[in-house]
Amino acid sequence: MEVRHKSRLFNGLVVDLEQLDVQIGSKGWHTYQIVRHPGGAAVLPLHDDNTVTLIRQLRPAVEEFTIEIPAGRLSPNENPIDCGRRELAEETGLTAAVLSPLGQIFTSPGVFDEIIHLFLATGLSQGVSQPDPYEDITTLRIPLSEALRMAQDGRISDGKTIAALLRAAAGRP
């Protein structure tokens, strides 16, 4: 891929916006605007009784509460597994003996460069959650089978959560 005329249009608190021209084979040069994001980690907590802990969180971007797995943005130079452990504890109060990788996803590769690292948390212990002051979060513990039905019928519409549930149910990343 050949790139030219790369420029930063916006530097934000969470994301930056970049514009660049890309040569698409023999189709010539085309201008793209890309949202640059530091990436994140998301964790599906699976309890010994085959239930999962999900969160219900207010998402102002879509003007509603969504049902999701605990997740958060990577800090500079942060290892994704450390981010996953931090977010799991902050949002649910859970700690995990084991975090197993469930692979990665691109959230919207036509516009964003964001990568989310997915993990399955097992060997769970309950503590006290400490969400960030701006987060409106409640937890929901349900059977994994019910969470999968919710992903299938649309009650769960968050992409990272759907991907993590499907990958965990299939037993592979």
Image (tube, rainbow, N blue to C red):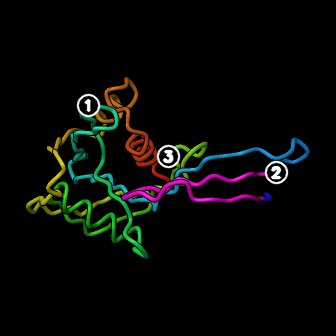
Residue 146 rendering spot, x and y as whole percentages: 28, 32
Residue 84 rendering spot, x and y as whole percentages: 33, 63
**Left or right placement of residue 156 versus residue 47 in this view:** right
Q: Residue at x 49, y 53 (%)?
A: 172
Distance (Cα) linking label 1 and label 3 = 19 Å
Q: Please name the residue that numbered disc 1 is placed on.
A: 64
Foreground: disc 2 or disc 3? 2
Q: Residue at x 39, y 74 (%)?
A: 78
Nearest the viewer among 13 and 94 is 13
Residue 95 rendering spot, x and y as whole percentages: 20, 65
Q: Residue at x 41, y 48 (%)?
A: 168
Q: Please name the residue that numbered disc 2 is placed on.
A: 23
What's the magenta region? 3-23
Distance (Cα) linking label 2 and label 3 = 24 Å
| Residue 42 is a magenta residue | no
Crowding at mark 3 (Cα within 10 Å: few <14, some 14-19, many 20+): some
- Secondary element at image label 1: strand
The correct choice, above or below, for 6 with respect to 33 in the image is below
Residue type marked 2:
Gln
**Left or right placement of residue 32 versus residue 157 in this view:** right
Mark 1 or mark 2: name the one nearer the start of the chain: 2
Q: Residue at x 91, y 45 (%)?
A: 26
Q: Can residue 51 be spotted in the picture?
A: no
Q: Please name the residue that numbered disc 3 is placed on.
A: 107
Distance (Cα) linking label 1 and label 2 = 39 Å
- Secondary element at image label 3: loop
Foreground: disc 1 or disc 2? 2
